[in-house]
Amino acid sequence: MTKEQLGTFIAENRRDRGLTQRDLAERLHITDKAVSKWERGLSYPDVTLLEPLAEVFGLGVEELVACEKREEEQPVKTILEISRESRQSDRRRAIIRTALSALVMVGVALLVFWYSGTYIHEEREDSIFLKETVGDVQYLYVEQEGHLLRLRCGDAVDFDAVEQTNERGKVVYRLDCRWNRKTYRGVVNACTRTEMVVLGGMMDVDFMDMSPAYVNSLFGYTPVLYTLEKPYPDPFGAPRGQVWLWDYRFYTGELNEKRGIWETREELLHIEDCMNVTVADFDGDGANEVIARTRWPEKPYTVYKRVNGEIISLWPETVSPEIQEALLCMWEEVP
């Protein structure tokens, strides 16, 4: 590097920056004559002025001394650009991952909230109201506040060994079950018999025998007397408009028509806690059956039929419109 080369380089950079010799001199705290000498190649700048002079021109000291600007090589520029884009991409991915994690956590929380509000897993002690086999699937029914829980039997449940009643009353079992509070359906995984039994119907009420009524023919018997007993308001019936539940008893025997009394009387059927009953030929076999309207929306009808001298219960999904009308309660009938 000669004085002339350095002077020419200083002059070119000064003009590129739009500075006069006086302007450059003021920034370096020297006289404009000193700047003039540099640019004419008469002298070198003082060593202490090299760094501030390079800063004015936006150069490094090495570039000033070498009298040339060094451009970044293209591969280096490309690598730096790729690095910047990669950092930006990483930041975007981090933001997306954080947002997705938050959404997953919210979704899991909502799922847990929904599940805990819909499904119940419990151990309960209860009597078995009904056993039912549909195809190859076996079910146990238990009462739940005005509803019937339909519990599908798991592999560990011995369905055939489950007894509903014995000589002491309704047998109580300890059940491990999970059920849906909206559909009242679920699964029972364990059913263990206890030493407890339940006596009577669902409510303890004073006995009240209503005026008896007669049926010409029932179960092959003639005549048949039936009575209504123990009326009480259904504690879970308000949403469905159910007001009263009754016990019904059907009797037969020998009636002394002259004296108007029963000399002998045999109970044929006792139905507990139902809304209404009617007598009709349900299945068209020529013999009358008793059709009861239950208090459970899941199993609204029970048909009592005599088969081989034994009265059995059937649970149809629906009954004819005529029977439905006959089973209307007083608070449901249209004047």
Image (cartoon, helix red, strand yellow):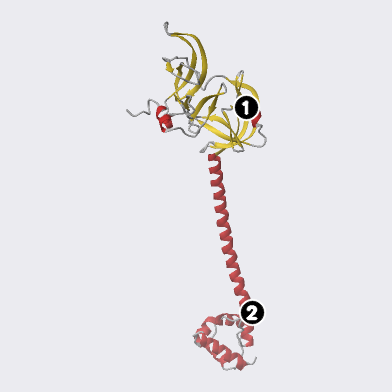
Q: Amino acid at mark 2?
A: Pro
| Residue 154 relative to residue 275: left or right | right
Sequence-earlier tag: 2 or 1: 2
Q: Amino acid at mark 1?
A: Tyr
| Residue that label 2 marks | 75
| Residue that label 1 marks | 173
Estimate how packed mark 2 is, as few (under 14), some (14 to 19) or many (20 or more) residues with alpha carbons within 10 Å. Answer: few
The quarter of the rendered structure image containing the C terminus is top left
Relative depth, front residue between 312 and 241: 312
Q: Label 2 to label 1, Cα distance in Å?
A: 81 Å
Q: Position of residue 82 (x, y in %)?
A: 61, 73
* In this rendering, the label closer to the viewer, 2 or 1: 1
Relative depth, front residue between 283 and 87: 283
Q: Position of residue 317 (x, y in %)?
A: 49, 34
Relative depth, front residue between 327 and 238: 327
Q: Residue drawn 52% across and 84% down?
A: 24
Please identify the residue farthest to the left as the structure is shown.
Answer: 335
Relative depth, front residue between 48 and 223: 223
Q: Quadrant of residue 47?
A: bottom right
| Residue 259 relative to residue 174: left or right | left
